[in-house]
Image: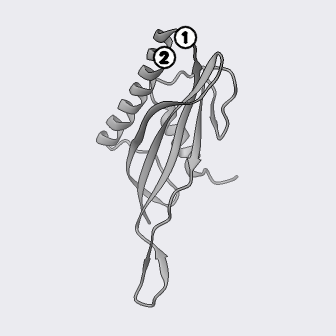
């Protein structure tokens, strides 16, 4: 059986957010055209290194991983729909911040998660005629074991 990777750990953790509907798909690296569903995308993250006494470059103990949480939402000229879409993302952002404060953190294979925080507020990244992709960015910081 393959090892569960970090993005799957994070997807399962985010799935526990009460603002996310259990009826909607929650995919990895894919968001369909139709509203409403969720997706988690990995973002390139810098691997930090330090030089040891032998001159070798080794990863530092503290590392980060960046992700985008996105959702396809109904979209159009109705301002109440836009307000509701941003309200959904505010609820998700507040939930992530609250979980971080409570130390209810996702797992990672490489070590122990120290924090998970939203780093960008919600915005429309791909508007369409009837639906749009909204997203936030999340930074996960962990200590390597």
How far, Cα to Cα, is label 1 from label 2? 8 Å
Taking the image as shown, residue 5 lies to the left or right of residue 32, namely: left
Up the image or down, 52 lies above or below 138; here it is below
Quadrant that contains the C terminus: bottom left
From the image, tell me which residue sits under label 2: 82
Up the image or down, 96 lies above or below 128; here it is below
From the image, tell me which residue sits under label 1: 77
| Residue drawn at point x = 34 percent, y = 42 percent | 100
Asked if residue 71 can be seen in this view, the reply is yes
Which of label 1 and label 2 is nearer to you? 1
Up the image or down, 4 lies above or below 132; here it is below
User: In the image, residue 114 lies at what x, y percent?
Assistant: 36, 53
* Pointer 1 or 2: first along the chain: 1
Up the image or down, 20 lies above or below 9; here it is above
Q: How is the image coloured?
A: one colour
User: In the image, residue 112 lies at what x, y percent?
Assistant: 41, 57
Q: Which one is in front, 89 or 104? A: 89
Quarter holding residue 84:
top left
| Residue drawn at point x = 55 percent, y = 11 percent | 77
Query: At numbered mark 2, what does the secondary structure look like: helix, strand or loop?
Result: helix
């Amino acid at each position: 059986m393959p090892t569960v990777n970090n993005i799957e750990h994070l997807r399962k953790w985010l799935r526990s957010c009460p603002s996310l509907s259990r009826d909607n798909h929650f995919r990895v690296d894919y968001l369909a055209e139709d509203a409403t569903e969720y997706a988690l995308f990995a973002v390139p993250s810098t691997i930090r290194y330090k030089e040891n006494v032998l001159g070798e470059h080794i990863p530092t103990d503290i590392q980060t991983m960046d992700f985008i949480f996105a959702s396809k939402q109904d979209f159009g000229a109705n301002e109440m729909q836009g307000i509701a879409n941003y309200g959904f993302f505010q609820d998700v952002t507040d939930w992530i911040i609250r979980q971080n404060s409570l130390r209810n953190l996702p797992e990672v294979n490489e070590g122990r998660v120290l924090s998970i925080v939203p780093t960008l507020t919600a915005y429309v990244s791909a508007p369409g005629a009837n639906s749009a992709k909204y997203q936030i960015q999340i930074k996960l910081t962990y200590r390597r074991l």
